[in-house]
Amino acid sequence: MNERLITHLRHVDLAVPDYDKQLEFYTTMWGLEPETSEDGIAFLAAAGSPEQYSVRLRRAQEKRLDLIAFGAATPDDVDALAERLLADSVQLVTRPDRLQTPGGGYGFRFFDNDGRTVEVSTGVAARRHRRVEEGESVPVKLSHVVLNSPNPEATVDFYRKHLSFALSDTLRHPAMGEMMWFLRTNRIHHSIAIARGPHVALHHASFEMRGIDEYMRGTGRLLRGGVEKVWGPGRHMAGNNTFSYFLDPHGNTVEYTTELECLDEDSWHPHIYDFSDPTVTDQWGTANPMEEFVARKSFNDPDRGCFVAPPV
Ligand SMILES: [Fe+2]
């Protein structure tokens, strides 16, 4: 396998028609901080994260996933990854260059096999962040992003082959076959996962809370606020993390999670879990049952951004 050049997940960027409503939801209800705002672009930071932003919102006519962004350790690593992708005939959107987004840095963009825009960067200035205090139910950081793909096996292969992600676990349904693949780029059980879906779309973006108490307080705030809950609260087997899934105003699924497993990579052996086993989907037994209706909620709308680079 190629050397791993991606260090971690940085942010997820969303374009939406009702920008004001979306901004209101992610700041007031979800608990992110608008760090920098220009006209029609908002950079939303998580209180406990050194990342300049964990979510970027952009006002646009059509809803889409603009990009997902990863970090690399050095400019040499960014260049090496771009060279590797070019050699493998992956379509670059931009060549490595200075970034114009908050914190600066050096990076480039490319399309993955499904046409999503992916950014890899390094040297972005750290944001002045803080320790999230006991009882404070705001995201500490972006935890992971899950992507729907109609060709999930090819997408898993893409991220393993070209970006050196490693498979941590797989969910398999006895009738439907393999449904979800958890991929890591560091010791965290998954920074991304690929889900079998009817079309390319964002499945969900997940945010790490300080601990169980803060995760439950956040879940309660959303429930009381009348935000549509998709699934949870519960605790998954794969990754051993807790989950509460809600819909944002544009129908993107967002998750509060905590205690996502950190692996010993040298000794880890991937599992194939039976997705029809209720203790696999929820070890606690507190979540609503996983059934087709729940699964459909996270299919999301077909992404309008496939093989179309975002304008910024
Ligand atoms: Fe998740």
Image (tube, rainbow, N blue to C red):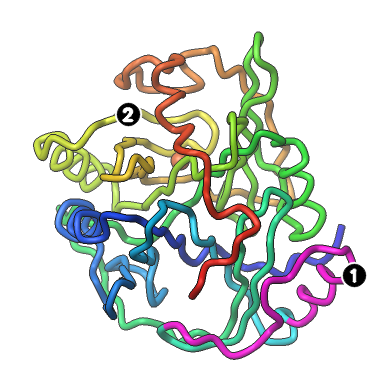
Quarter assignment of residue 61: bottom left
- Where residue 252 sits in the image (x, y, percent)? 38, 43
* Residue holding disc 1: 87
Q: Residues within 10 Å of mark 2 (few under 14, many from 20)?
A: many
Above or below — where is 105 with respect to 29?
Answer: below
Q: Earlier in the sequence, mark 2 or mark 1?
A: 1
Above or below — where is 296 with respect to 5?
Answer: above
The kind of residue on which mark 1 rests is: Ala
Q: Which residue is more in the foreground, 110 or 237?
A: 110
- Where residue 210 sits in the image (x, y, percent)? 29, 54
| 12 with respect to 32 (left or right) | right
- Where residue 95 sits in the image (x, y, percent)? 71, 81
For the residues marked 2 and 1, what is the alpha-carbon distance in whole angstroms?
42 Å
Q: Is residue 19 a member of the stretch shown in magenta?
A: no
Task: Please state, as top left, top right, bottom left or bottom right, where the N terminus lies in the image.
Answer: bottom right
Q: Residues within 10 Å of mark 1 (few under 14, many from 20)?
A: few
Please tell me whether mark 2 sits on a helix, a strand or a loop.
Answer: strand
At x 39%, y 75%, the residue is 50
| 233 with respect to 279 (left or right) | left
Above or below — where is 290 with respect to 92?
Answer: above
- Where residue 120 sits in the image (x, y, percent)? 62, 72
The kind of residue on which mark 2 rests is: Val
| 49 with respect to 302 (left or right) | left
In magenta, the rendered stretch is 79-101
Q: Can you tell me which quadrant of the image ligand 1 is in?
A: top left
Quarter assignment of residue 246: top left
At x 86%, y 64%, the residue is 89
Please tell me whether mark 1 sits on a helix, a strand or a loop.
Answer: helix
At x 49%, y 40%, the residue is 203
* Residue holding disc 2: 230
